Amino acid sequence: MFATMEAVRVEELHLASDPQTGLQAIVAIHNTHLGPALGGCRYLAYPDVDSAVRDAARLARGMSYKAALAGLALGGGKAVIIRPPQPSSREALFEAFGRFVDKLGGRYITAVDSGTSGVDMDCIARHTAHVTSTTAGGDPSPHTALGVLAGIRATAKARLGSDKLDGLCIAVQGLGHVGFALAGHLAEAGARLIVSDIDEGRLEQAVEHFGAQPVVADALLTMPCDILAPCGLGGVINPQTIGKLRCAAVAGAANNQLDSPEMGDELAARGILYAPDYVINSGGLIFVALQHQGCSHEEITAHLAHIDSRLTEIYDEALVERRSPARVADSLAERLIYGS
């Protein structure tokens, strides 16, 4: 565990176990240099505890970088709850997690993530104030989708010469809350859509509502398109897939799209422009963070405009320095966080 912490510079790692509810939770606090650590809570099955720790630590670092580049006075954290085979009571389990979060004294603020919902956050909120994205607060997914849309426009302008999406072919991998909303925005903007998802019902809706072309998940990465938008789980750009890509740019909502930093270098070498995921998908974080601080809808919407300007800054610096946008984004985030 210490090796994992040192590898990604995690400040704190907290574990909790509650046999009565089946809770086995991990909170990784990457840093609190800019403010308290905010990050979602995942509720997923993991093959072992080490895998859950690695996931929490890597995602916590991404949240730190995301908050810094989004201009938020926050650090980064992430929680994972190892989903038990048969929880006796989901409500009791998340209440137990709320008590765990409260003991951290505000150093970590939790929120929705893969496998959790606003209802789960309501259970947590019974025992701590250090939670956001409750049902009263609303779903952050629409703001994530709007931020990704703005980022795709910035990416299209940098790589294709125009931010107009009319007529562009965009492949959307994953039609969850964010991916489906994004597909709707792209269709409204006149883009031609290729889509994939393991949920056949979602595919049928995308075909019906957006005129999208459905393909099986494995085939989508090999389809010729202008922009590939990964909106599912991470690691989609890896040694097995990178040589099959037939796109001009990669710009989507998924976290940890690159299997390793070297994948960003290889994308750049192949002339494929990559939108660093934690920059382009920061709309949801902006929403939950500013809402937690009591900001107005207008203030939140205005802050979303930082996403495309930040991406443009990264693309310009990458061009000048002849480095991949992924490397440039990491360096910029680290300067903001650590001042070096």
Image (tube, rainbow, N blue to C red):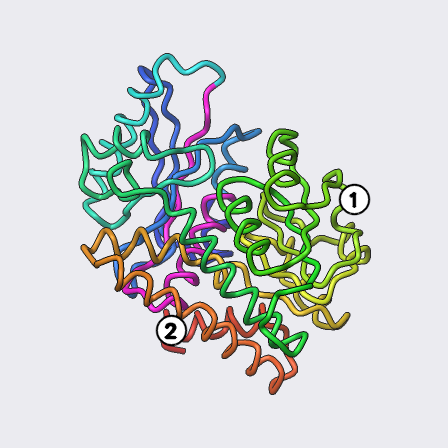
Question: Residue at (29%, 20%) from the top-left corner?
Answer: 92
Q: Nearer the viewer, mark 1 or mark 2?
A: 1
Left or right position of 246 against 23: right
Q: Earlier in the sequence, mark 1 or mark 2?
A: 1
Q: Going by the image, does 91 lie left or right of 278?
A: left
Q: Residue at x 43, y 70 (%)?
A: 334
Residue 144, image x, y percentages: 44, 53
Residue under numbered circle 2 = 336
| In-front residue for pair 83/133 | 133
Secondary structure found at label 2: helix
Q: Position of residue 129 (x, y in %)?
A: 18, 41
Quarter of the figure with residue 175: top right
Question: Residue at 46% of width from left, 48% of height from top?
Answer: 57
Q: Amino acid at mark 2?
A: Leu
Q: Is residue 83 above or below residue 184?
A: above
Q: Marks 1 and 2, Cα distance to the nearest angstrom? A: 39 Å
Q: Position of residue 291 (x, y in %)?
A: 25, 53
Q: Is residue 172 above or below residue 18?
A: below
Instruction: Judge whether residue 67 is colored magenta.
Output: yes
- Dividing the picture into quadrants, the one containing residue 104 is top left
Q: Residue at x 31, y 53 (%)?
A: 37
Q: Which quadrant would the C terminus be assigned to in this image?
A: bottom left
Q: Is residue 281 left or right of residue 225?
A: left
| Relative height, residue 141 to residue 86 (above, below) | below
Mark 1 highlights which residue?
A: 219
